């Protein structure tokens, strides 16, 4: 899929932003593009680079979530009595589900993951500030 200006819809929730749906592995993923301080063409270039090689970028994003949150979950959030047992890496990954991607400017990308209740239904977000590497993460919600 190539994202073009013609298929973008105006995002009614964020002024100056656009939305489009991306299908990956039979899953619909909401994309938000916010050019912020650059042209929409520059933000589209970033989005198309990521989407065009999504398997690679998805793995980078998922890896940073696992590296940053697996131990935190096991040490602080797991609760076997209520259905949240200690997990190994494979089990932890199986609870992650991509829910959306935000592209900001020409080099910032946030990939949002649902976490199947492991963290009280917060979003886990893998972040790239250079449009290439996902080295940061945060929890939201």
Image: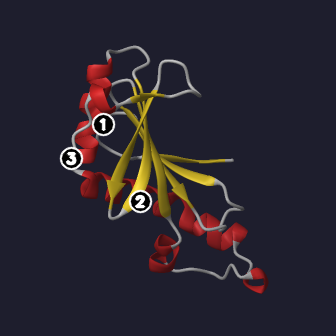
From the viewer's perspective, is 126 left or right of 38? Answer: right
Question: In what element is the residue under mark 1?
Answer: helix
Residue lying at the far right of the rendered structure: 81
Q: Looking at the rendered structure, which numbered label has been put on residue 141? A: none
Q: CA distance from mark 2 to mark 3?
A: 17 Å
116 on left or right of 33: right
Residue shown at 61% from the left, 68% from the top: 116
Q: Earlier in the sequence, mark 2 or mark 3?
A: 3
Separation of marks 3 and 1 at Cα, in angstroms? 8 Å
Q: Nearest the camera: 55 or 5?
A: 5
Residue count near mark 1 (Cα–Cα under 10 Å), binned few <14, some 14–19, many ≥20: many
On screen, residue 75 above or below 128: below
Q: Which residue is mark 2?
A: 62
The residue to which callout 3 is attached is 52
Depth order, front residue of 8/90: 8
Report x, y in % for residue 94: 48, 74
Mark 2 crowdedness (10 Å alpha carbons): few <14, some 14-19, many ≥20: many
Residue 17 lies, in percent from the top left, at: 47, 24
Closer to the chain start, of discs 3 and 1, is 1
């Amino acid at each position: 899929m190539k994202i073009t200006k013609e298929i973008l819809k105006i995002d009614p929730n964020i002024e100056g932003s656009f939305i489009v749906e991306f299908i990956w592995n039979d899953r619909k993923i909401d994309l938000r593009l916010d050019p912020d301080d650059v042209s929409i063409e520059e933000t589209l270039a970033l989005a198309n680079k990521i989407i065009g090689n999504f398997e690679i970028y998805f793995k980078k994003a998922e890896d940073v979530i696992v590296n940053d949150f697996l131990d935190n979950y096991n040490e602080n959030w797991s609760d076997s009595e209520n259905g949240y047992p200690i997990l190994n890496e494979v089990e932890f990954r199986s609870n992650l589900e991509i829910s959306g991607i935000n592209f900001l400017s020409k080099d910032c990308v946030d990939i949002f993951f649902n976490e199947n209740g492991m963290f009280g239904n917060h979003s886990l977000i893998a972040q790239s500030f250079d449009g290439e590497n996902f080295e940061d993460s945060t929890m939201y919600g």
